[in-house]
Amino acid sequence: MNFLNNRHSLLFLINIIALLACITLLTRVYTTIGMSATWLLLLVLAISLIASLLTLFKRQDQQLIQVIRALANGDHTLGFSAHHPMREHFKGVKNQMQSARFIAEQQSDFLKALLVHVDLAVIVCDAQGNIIESNPAVARLLGKSAGHLKELCHIGTIILAAQKNLHSTVQWLHGEQQDTFTLQISIAEILGQECKIVTLQSIHELLINKEQQAYKRLTQVLTHEVANTITPLSSLAQTCLGLIPINLNFIDEESKQDLTLALNTLASRTEYLSEFIASFRQISNLPLPNLVPTQIAPILERMQILHRQQFSDSDITLTIDIQSQYLVMLDNGQIEQVLINLVKNAIEAVRLNINQHVILGDNEIEQGRILLTVAQNSAQQLYIEIADNGAGIVSEAREMIFVPFFTTKQQGSGIGLSLSRQIMINHGGDLVFLTRPKGACFRCIFG
Protein backbone atom coordinates (compact mmCIF):
# COMPACT_ATOMS: atom_id res chain seq x y z
CA MET A 1 0.00 0.00 0.00
CA ASN A 2 2.84 2.39 0.87
CA PHE A 3 4.44 1.54 -2.44
CA LEU A 4 1.23 2.54 -4.34
CA ASN A 5 1.00 5.78 -2.33
CA ASN A 6 4.51 6.82 -3.47
CA ARG A 7 4.12 8.91 -6.65
CA HIS A 8 7.54 8.05 -8.03
CA SER A 9 7.05 4.34 -7.39
CA LEU A 10 3.58 4.40 -9.01
CA LEU A 11 4.90 6.17 -12.12
CA PHE A 12 7.76 3.68 -12.31
CA LEU A 13 5.30 0.75 -12.08
CA ILE A 14 2.98 2.20 -14.75
CA ASN A 15 5.90 2.81 -17.07
CA ILE A 16 7.22 -0.75 -16.63
CA ILE A 17 3.77 -2.32 -17.27
CA ALA A 18 3.19 -0.09 -20.30
CA LEU A 19 6.67 -0.87 -21.65
CA LEU A 20 6.16 -4.63 -21.25
CA ALA A 21 2.74 -4.41 -22.93
CA CYS A 22 4.19 -2.32 -25.74
CA ILE A 23 7.06 -4.76 -26.32
CA THR A 24 4.61 -7.70 -26.35
CA LEU A 25 2.36 -6.00 -28.93
CA LEU A 26 5.38 -4.89 -30.93
CA THR A 27 6.63 -8.48 -31.13
CA ARG A 28 3.19 -9.89 -32.01
CA VAL A 29 2.58 -7.29 -34.75
CA TYR A 30 6.02 -7.89 -36.23
CA THR A 31 5.55 -11.66 -36.34
CA THR A 32 2.05 -11.36 -37.78
CA ILE A 33 2.20 -8.65 -40.42
CA GLY A 34 5.84 -7.51 -40.30
CA MET A 35 6.87 -3.88 -40.31
CA SER A 36 3.93 -1.55 -40.68
CA ALA A 37 2.67 1.80 -39.48
CA THR A 38 1.18 0.16 -36.39
CA TRP A 39 4.54 -1.46 -35.61
CA LEU A 40 6.37 1.87 -36.02
CA LEU A 41 3.84 3.57 -33.75
CA LEU A 42 4.36 0.92 -31.11
CA LEU A 43 8.18 1.31 -31.47
CA VAL A 44 7.95 5.05 -30.91
CA LEU A 45 5.72 4.42 -27.89
CA ALA A 46 8.26 1.91 -26.47
CA ILE A 47 11.13 4.36 -26.95
CA SER A 48 9.09 7.05 -25.21
CA LEU A 49 8.44 4.75 -22.27
CA ILE A 50 12.16 3.93 -22.01
CA ALA A 51 12.98 7.66 -22.08
CA SER A 52 10.37 8.24 -19.35
CA LEU A 53 11.98 5.54 -17.20
CA LEU A 54 15.43 7.08 -17.70
CA THR A 55 14.02 10.50 -16.71
CA LEU A 56 12.51 8.99 -13.55
CA PHE A 57 15.90 7.45 -12.62
CA LYS A 58 17.68 10.72 -13.36
CA ARG A 59 15.23 12.68 -11.19
CA GLN A 60 15.71 10.20 -8.36
CA ASP A 61 19.49 10.56 -8.64
CA GLN A 62 19.31 14.38 -8.71
CA GLN A 63 17.00 14.43 -5.70
CA LEU A 64 19.33 12.10 -3.82
CA ILE A 65 22.38 14.23 -4.71
CA GLN A 66 20.61 17.47 -3.67
CA VAL A 67 19.50 16.01 -0.35
CA ILE A 68 22.98 14.66 0.44
CA ARG A 69 24.63 17.98 -0.49
CA ALA A 70 22.15 19.92 1.64
CA LEU A 71 22.80 17.54 4.52
CA ALA A 72 26.57 17.98 4.15
CA ASN A 73 26.17 21.79 4.17
CA GLY A 74 24.00 21.73 7.27
CA ASP A 75 20.76 22.56 5.42
CA HIS A 76 18.04 20.32 6.85
CA THR A 77 15.12 21.89 4.96
CA LEU A 78 15.40 19.39 2.08
CA GLY A 79 14.39 15.77 2.48
CA PHE A 80 12.52 12.81 1.02
CA SER A 81 8.76 12.51 0.72
CA ALA A 82 6.75 10.81 3.43
CA HIS A 83 6.65 7.45 1.61
CA HIS A 84 10.15 7.46 0.10
CA PRO A 85 11.95 4.17 0.87
CA MET A 86 15.11 6.03 2.02
CA ARG A 87 13.27 8.49 4.27
CA GLU A 88 13.90 6.55 7.51
CA HIS A 89 17.58 6.00 6.68
CA PHE A 90 17.91 9.68 5.82
CA LYS A 91 16.32 10.72 9.13
CA GLY A 92 18.75 8.48 11.03
CA VAL A 93 21.80 9.93 9.24
CA LYS A 94 20.48 13.49 9.66
CA ASN A 95 19.97 13.04 13.40
CA GLN A 96 23.45 11.60 13.81
CA MET A 97 25.02 14.48 11.84
CA GLN A 98 23.02 17.08 13.77
CA SER A 99 24.11 15.53 17.05
CA ALA A 100 27.76 15.37 15.94
CA ARG A 101 27.64 18.98 14.68
CA PHE A 102 26.02 20.17 17.93
CA ILE A 103 28.70 18.42 20.02
CA ALA A 104 31.47 19.86 17.80
CA GLU A 105 30.01 23.39 18.11
CA GLN A 106 29.76 23.00 21.88
CA GLN A 107 33.39 21.89 22.08
CA SER A 108 34.43 24.75 19.79
CA ASP A 109 32.53 27.32 21.89
CA PHE A 110 34.02 25.86 25.08
CA LEU A 111 37.58 26.06 23.71
CA LYS A 112 37.03 29.61 22.44
CA ALA A 113 35.63 30.71 25.81
CA LEU A 114 38.53 29.00 27.56
CA LEU A 115 41.11 30.76 25.38
CA VAL A 116 39.40 34.12 25.93
CA HIS A 117 39.46 33.85 29.73
CA VAL A 118 42.86 32.22 30.37
CA ASP A 119 45.87 34.44 31.07
CA LEU A 120 48.06 32.17 28.98
CA ALA A 121 48.74 33.78 25.59
CA VAL A 122 48.22 31.27 22.75
CA ILE A 123 49.34 31.79 19.13
CA VAL A 124 48.85 29.35 16.23
CA CYS A 125 50.90 30.14 13.12
CA ASP A 126 51.85 28.41 9.87
CA ALA A 127 55.34 27.62 8.57
CA GLN A 128 55.55 31.04 6.86
CA GLY A 129 54.90 32.90 10.11
CA ASN A 130 51.32 33.95 9.39
CA ILE A 131 49.30 34.00 12.61
CA ILE A 132 46.23 31.82 12.04
CA GLU A 133 44.67 32.14 15.49
CA SER A 134 45.40 33.93 18.76
CA ASN A 135 43.51 34.72 21.96
CA PRO A 136 42.99 38.15 23.64
CA ALA A 137 45.72 37.36 26.21
CA VAL A 138 48.31 37.93 23.45
CA ALA A 139 47.33 41.59 23.07
CA ARG A 140 47.14 42.01 26.86
CA LEU A 141 50.57 40.48 27.41
CA LEU A 142 52.45 41.99 24.47
CA GLY A 143 50.58 45.30 24.36
CA LYS A 144 49.62 44.85 20.70
CA SER A 145 47.96 42.50 18.22
CA ALA A 146 49.85 40.92 15.34
CA GLY A 147 49.08 39.24 12.03
CA HIS A 148 52.60 37.96 11.36
CA LEU A 149 55.45 36.78 13.57
CA LYS A 150 57.74 39.50 12.19
CA GLU A 151 55.67 42.01 14.19
CA LEU A 152 56.79 40.29 17.42
CA CYS A 153 60.47 41.29 17.00
CA HIS A 154 62.94 38.85 18.58
CA ILE A 155 60.18 36.57 19.88
CA GLY A 156 58.89 36.14 16.32
CA THR A 157 62.43 35.40 15.11
CA ILE A 158 62.81 32.64 17.71
CA ILE A 159 59.45 31.09 16.76
CA LEU A 160 60.22 31.20 13.01
CA ALA A 161 63.64 29.60 13.53
CA ALA A 162 62.31 26.77 15.73
CA GLN A 163 62.50 23.41 13.95
CA LYS A 164 61.42 21.32 16.93
CA ASN A 165 59.56 21.70 20.21
CA LEU A 166 61.16 24.40 22.36
CA HIS A 167 60.83 25.70 25.93
CA SER A 168 62.68 28.87 26.89
CA THR A 169 62.45 32.28 28.59
CA VAL A 170 62.52 35.60 26.73
CA GLN A 171 62.59 39.29 27.64
CA TRP A 172 59.94 41.70 26.36
CA LEU A 173 59.74 45.47 26.67
CA HIS A 174 56.07 46.45 27.18
CA GLY A 175 56.15 50.21 26.81
CA GLU A 176 58.90 51.13 29.27
CA GLN A 177 58.47 48.09 31.51
CA GLN A 178 60.69 45.05 31.18
CA ASP A 179 58.86 41.72 31.37
CA THR A 180 60.00 38.09 31.37
CA PHE A 181 58.02 35.39 29.52
CA THR A 182 58.16 31.63 29.39
CA LEU A 183 58.01 30.65 25.71
CA GLN A 184 56.84 27.18 24.67
CA ILE A 185 56.68 26.10 21.02
CA SER A 186 55.01 22.88 19.85
CA ILE A 187 55.02 21.77 16.22
CA ALA A 188 51.90 19.87 15.11
CA GLU A 189 49.96 19.01 11.95
CA ILE A 190 46.51 20.63 11.84
CA LEU A 191 44.15 19.92 8.89
CA GLY A 192 47.05 18.58 6.87
CA GLN A 193 49.18 21.69 7.46
CA GLU A 194 52.26 21.98 9.67
CA CYS A 195 51.60 24.60 12.35
CA LYS A 196 53.37 25.95 15.40
CA ILE A 197 51.43 26.29 18.63
CA VAL A 198 53.05 28.96 20.81
CA THR A 199 52.24 29.79 24.45
CA LEU A 200 53.55 32.81 26.36
CA GLN A 201 53.22 33.47 30.08
CA SER A 202 54.60 36.31 32.18
CA ILE A 203 56.77 35.24 35.12
CA HIS A 204 57.94 38.76 35.99
CA GLU A 205 55.90 39.01 39.21
CA LEU A 206 56.88 35.48 40.21
CA LEU A 207 60.58 36.29 39.79
CA ILE A 208 60.21 39.53 41.77
CA ASN A 209 58.39 37.73 44.60
CA LYS A 210 61.05 35.01 44.73
CA GLU A 211 63.76 37.66 44.73
CA GLN A 212 62.10 39.59 47.55
CA GLN A 213 61.61 36.44 49.60
CA ALA A 214 65.30 35.58 49.20
CA TYR A 215 66.29 39.09 50.28
CA LYS A 216 64.00 38.86 53.31
CA ARG A 217 65.50 35.56 54.45
CA LEU A 218 69.02 36.90 53.92
CA THR A 219 68.21 40.10 55.81
CA GLN A 220 66.69 38.21 58.73
CA VAL A 221 69.77 36.01 59.07
CA LEU A 222 72.25 38.87 58.73
CA THR A 223 70.47 41.22 61.11
CA HIS A 224 70.09 38.49 63.71
CA GLU A 225 73.74 37.42 63.59
CA VAL A 226 75.22 40.92 63.36
CA ALA A 227 72.94 42.34 66.07
CA ASN A 228 73.95 39.54 68.44
CA THR A 229 77.60 40.50 67.93
CA ILE A 230 77.23 44.29 68.02
CA THR A 231 75.12 44.56 71.19
CA PRO A 232 77.77 43.18 73.62
CA LEU A 233 80.53 45.17 71.86
CA SER A 234 78.65 48.43 72.40
CA SER A 235 77.97 47.53 76.02
CA LEU A 236 81.62 46.63 76.63
CA ALA A 237 82.84 49.88 75.07
CA GLN A 238 80.56 51.95 77.27
CA THR A 239 81.62 49.94 80.34
CA CYS A 240 85.32 50.42 79.59
CA LEU A 241 84.82 54.15 79.18
CA GLY A 242 83.17 54.29 82.58
CA LEU A 243 85.94 52.25 84.23
CA ILE A 244 88.77 54.62 83.23
CA PRO A 245 89.55 56.74 86.33
CA ILE A 246 89.76 60.45 85.78
CA ASN A 247 93.07 60.65 87.68
CA LEU A 248 94.56 57.59 85.96
CA ASN A 249 98.15 58.39 85.03
CA PHE A 250 99.75 57.15 81.80
CA ILE A 251 103.40 57.29 80.98
CA ASP A 252 102.34 59.26 77.94
CA GLU A 253 99.23 61.49 78.15
CA GLU A 254 98.70 60.90 74.47
CA SER A 255 98.19 57.18 75.14
CA LYS A 256 95.27 57.98 77.45
CA GLN A 257 93.74 60.16 74.77
CA ASP A 258 94.19 57.40 72.20
CA LEU A 259 92.50 54.86 74.49
CA THR A 260 89.58 57.19 75.14
CA LEU A 261 89.27 57.97 71.45
CA ALA A 262 89.36 54.27 70.55
CA LEU A 263 86.65 53.39 73.06
CA ASN A 264 84.49 56.35 71.98
CA THR A 265 84.90 55.35 68.35
CA LEU A 266 84.04 51.73 69.12
CA ALA A 267 80.94 52.81 71.05
CA SER A 268 79.76 55.26 68.36
CA ARG A 269 80.36 52.85 65.48
CA THR A 270 78.61 49.97 67.21
CA GLU A 271 75.70 52.30 67.98
CA TYR A 272 75.59 53.34 64.30
CA LEU A 273 75.70 49.70 63.21
CA SER A 274 72.84 48.91 65.59
CA GLU A 275 70.76 51.63 63.96
CA PHE A 276 71.89 50.39 60.56
CA ILE A 277 70.76 46.84 61.32
CA ALA A 278 67.48 48.14 62.74
CA SER A 279 66.80 49.86 59.43
CA PHE A 280 67.51 46.59 57.59
CA ARG A 281 64.81 44.92 59.64
CA GLN A 282 62.25 47.18 58.00
CA ILE A 283 62.58 45.13 54.79
CA SER A 284 61.79 41.79 56.41
CA ASN A 285 59.21 43.19 58.88
CA LEU A 286 57.36 45.50 56.51
CA PRO A 287 53.63 45.39 57.40
CA LEU A 288 51.05 44.74 54.71
CA PRO A 289 49.49 47.94 53.36
CA ASN A 290 46.10 49.14 54.59
CA LEU A 291 44.55 49.91 51.20
CA VAL A 292 41.96 52.67 50.92
CA PRO A 293 40.77 54.62 47.82
CA THR A 294 42.92 57.76 47.65
CA GLN A 295 43.60 60.73 45.38
CA ILE A 296 47.28 61.10 44.43
CA ALA A 297 47.37 64.90 44.05
CA PRO A 298 47.13 65.75 47.81
CA ILE A 299 50.04 63.39 48.55
CA LEU A 300 52.26 65.18 46.01
CA GLU A 301 51.26 68.54 47.46
CA ARG A 302 52.38 67.33 50.90
CA MET A 303 55.72 66.28 49.36
CA GLN A 304 56.12 69.80 48.02
CA ILE A 305 55.42 71.34 51.44
CA LEU A 306 57.67 68.82 53.24
CA HIS A 307 60.70 69.55 51.03
CA ARG A 308 60.03 73.26 50.42
CA GLN A 309 63.04 74.41 52.45
CA GLN A 310 65.39 71.98 50.69
CA PHE A 311 64.14 73.12 47.28
CA SER A 312 64.70 76.72 48.27
CA ASP A 313 68.19 76.11 49.72
CA SER A 314 69.34 74.20 46.63
CA ASP A 315 67.56 76.44 44.09
CA ILE A 316 65.54 73.48 42.76
CA THR A 317 62.25 73.91 40.91
CA LEU A 318 59.56 71.31 41.64
CA THR A 319 56.81 70.82 39.06
CA ILE A 320 53.71 68.68 39.64
CA ASP A 321 51.86 67.42 36.54
CA ILE A 322 48.51 65.72 37.26
CA GLN A 323 47.27 63.98 34.08
CA SER A 324 44.89 61.55 35.80
CA GLN A 325 42.49 62.16 38.67
CA TYR A 326 41.49 58.51 39.22
CA LEU A 327 41.32 57.09 42.73
CA VAL A 328 43.81 54.36 43.53
CA MET A 329 43.91 51.80 46.36
CA LEU A 330 46.95 52.54 48.54
CA ASP A 331 48.35 52.88 52.04
CA ASN A 332 48.87 56.61 52.52
CA GLY A 333 51.74 56.33 55.00
CA GLN A 334 53.71 53.76 53.02
CA ILE A 335 53.35 55.57 49.69
CA GLU A 336 54.44 58.83 51.32
CA GLN A 337 57.54 57.03 52.60
CA VAL A 338 58.31 55.82 49.05
CA LEU A 339 57.93 59.33 47.64
CA ILE A 340 60.06 60.81 50.44
CA ASN A 341 62.86 58.37 49.57
CA LEU A 342 62.65 59.08 45.84
CA VAL A 343 62.37 62.87 46.17
CA LYS A 344 65.30 62.86 48.63
CA ASN A 345 67.37 60.88 46.11
CA ALA A 346 66.39 63.32 43.35
CA ILE A 347 67.42 66.34 45.45
CA GLU A 348 70.79 64.74 46.24
CA ALA A 349 71.32 63.89 42.54
CA VAL A 350 70.58 67.47 41.48
CA ARG A 351 72.91 68.88 44.17
CA LEU A 352 75.67 66.49 43.07
CA ASN A 353 75.27 67.57 39.47
CA ILE A 354 75.49 71.25 40.44
CA ASN A 355 78.58 70.63 42.62
CA GLN A 356 80.30 68.77 39.79
CA HIS A 357 79.73 71.73 37.44
CA VAL A 358 81.06 74.12 40.09
CA ILE A 359 84.21 72.03 40.57
CA LEU A 360 84.75 71.94 36.80
CA GLY A 361 84.39 75.72 36.66
CA ASP A 362 81.33 75.64 34.43
CA ASN A 363 79.76 79.10 34.37
CA GLU A 364 76.51 77.93 32.73
CA ILE A 365 74.99 75.73 35.42
CA GLU A 366 71.51 74.48 34.59
CA GLN A 367 68.94 75.08 37.30
CA GLY A 368 67.91 71.95 39.17
CA ARG A 369 64.49 70.58 38.24
CA ILE A 370 62.34 67.78 39.64
CA LEU A 371 59.12 66.73 37.93
CA LEU A 372 56.38 64.70 39.65
CA THR A 373 53.87 63.25 37.16
CA VAL A 374 50.64 61.32 37.73
CA ALA A 375 49.34 59.53 34.61
CA GLN A 376 48.32 56.17 33.16
CA ASN A 377 50.44 53.83 31.08
CA SER A 378 49.39 51.76 28.04
CA ALA A 379 48.05 49.05 30.37
CA GLN A 380 45.78 51.66 32.04
CA GLN A 381 47.77 51.43 35.27
CA LEU A 382 48.08 54.61 37.32
CA TYR A 383 51.65 55.66 38.10
CA ILE A 384 53.65 58.38 39.84
CA GLU A 385 56.85 59.37 38.06
CA ILE A 386 59.74 61.17 39.75
CA ALA A 387 62.21 62.61 37.22
CA ASP A 388 65.16 64.96 37.75
CA ASN A 389 67.93 66.57 35.71
CA GLY A 390 70.64 65.54 38.15
CA ALA A 391 73.77 63.46 37.80
CA GLY A 392 71.85 60.30 36.86
CA ILE A 393 72.86 56.70 37.55
CA VAL A 394 75.81 55.08 35.81
CA SER A 395 74.87 52.19 33.55
CA GLU A 396 76.98 49.71 35.56
CA ALA A 397 74.89 50.35 38.70
CA ARG A 398 71.40 50.31 37.15
CA GLU A 399 70.97 46.56 37.44
CA MET A 400 71.89 46.66 41.15
CA ILE A 401 69.99 49.70 42.42
CA PHE A 402 67.10 47.62 43.86
CA VAL A 403 69.38 45.08 45.56
CA PRO A 404 69.32 45.48 49.37
CA PHE A 405 72.54 46.90 50.88
CA PHE A 406 73.80 48.10 47.47
CA THR A 407 74.50 51.85 47.34
CA THR A 408 76.61 54.31 45.36
CA LYS A 409 76.56 56.89 48.17
CA GLN A 410 79.29 57.19 50.76
CA GLN A 411 76.78 57.55 53.61
CA GLY A 412 73.99 55.45 52.09
CA SER A 413 72.50 52.37 53.70
CA GLY A 414 71.35 50.70 50.48
CA ILE A 415 67.81 49.96 51.65
CA GLY A 416 65.85 53.02 50.47
CA LEU A 417 65.10 51.84 46.92
CA SER A 418 64.77 48.21 47.98
CA LEU A 419 62.27 49.12 50.69
CA SER A 420 60.37 51.41 48.28
CA ARG A 421 60.12 48.68 45.68
CA GLN A 422 58.90 46.19 48.27
CA ILE A 423 56.16 48.64 49.28
CA MET A 424 55.05 49.04 45.64
CA ILE A 425 55.04 45.25 45.11
CA ASN A 426 52.86 44.87 48.22
CA HIS A 427 50.49 47.34 46.53
CA GLY A 428 50.24 45.01 43.54
CA GLY A 429 52.49 47.22 41.42
CA ASP A 430 56.18 47.83 40.92
CA LEU A 431 58.93 50.44 41.10
CA VAL A 432 60.96 50.68 37.89
CA PHE A 433 63.88 52.77 36.70
CA LEU A 434 63.41 54.40 33.29
CA THR A 435 66.34 55.44 31.13
CA ARG A 436 66.33 59.12 30.20
CA PRO A 437 68.82 61.18 28.15
CA LYS A 438 69.61 63.21 31.25
CA GLY A 439 69.10 62.65 34.96
CA ALA A 440 67.17 59.79 36.58
CA CYS A 441 63.55 58.75 36.41
CA PHE A 442 61.68 56.35 38.70
CA ARG A 443 58.10 55.23 38.14
CA CYS A 444 55.83 53.95 40.93
CA ILE A 445 53.25 51.75 39.20
CA PHE A 446 50.03 50.75 40.98
CA GLY A 447 48.34 47.41 40.22
Image (cartoon, helix red, strand yellow):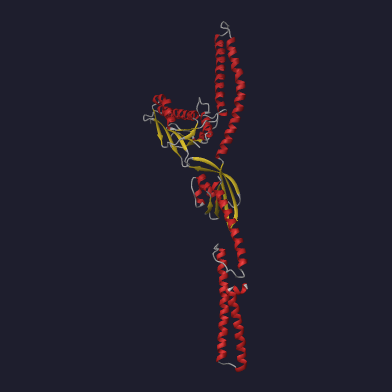
- Please state the horizontal and vertical placement of residue 433, each as a whole percent of the image: 49, 35
Which quadrant of the figure has residue 264?
Answer: top right
Is residue 333 in sight in this rendering?
yes
Q: Residue at x 60, y 19 (%)?
A: 231
Front position in the image: 286 or 105: 105
Q: Is residue 306 above or below residue 194?
A: above
Front position in the image: 93 or 257: 93
Q: Quadrant of the N terminus?
A: bottom right
Q: Residue furthest top?
A: 247
Which quadrant of the figure has residue 50?
Answer: bottom right
- Please state the horizontal and vertical placement of residue 140, each as a whole percent of the image: 51, 45
Which quadrant of the figure has residue 67?
Answer: bottom right
Q: How many numbered dots are placed on residues in this image?
A: 0
Q: Residue furthest front?
A: 1
- Please state the horizontal and vertical placement of residue 211, each as a whole percent of the image: 58, 35
Front position in the image: 43 or 385: 43
Left or right: residue 245 compared with residue 438: right
Q: Is residue 425 above or below residue 231?
A: below
Q: Residue furthest bottom?
A: 33
Is residue 443 in sight in this rendering?
no
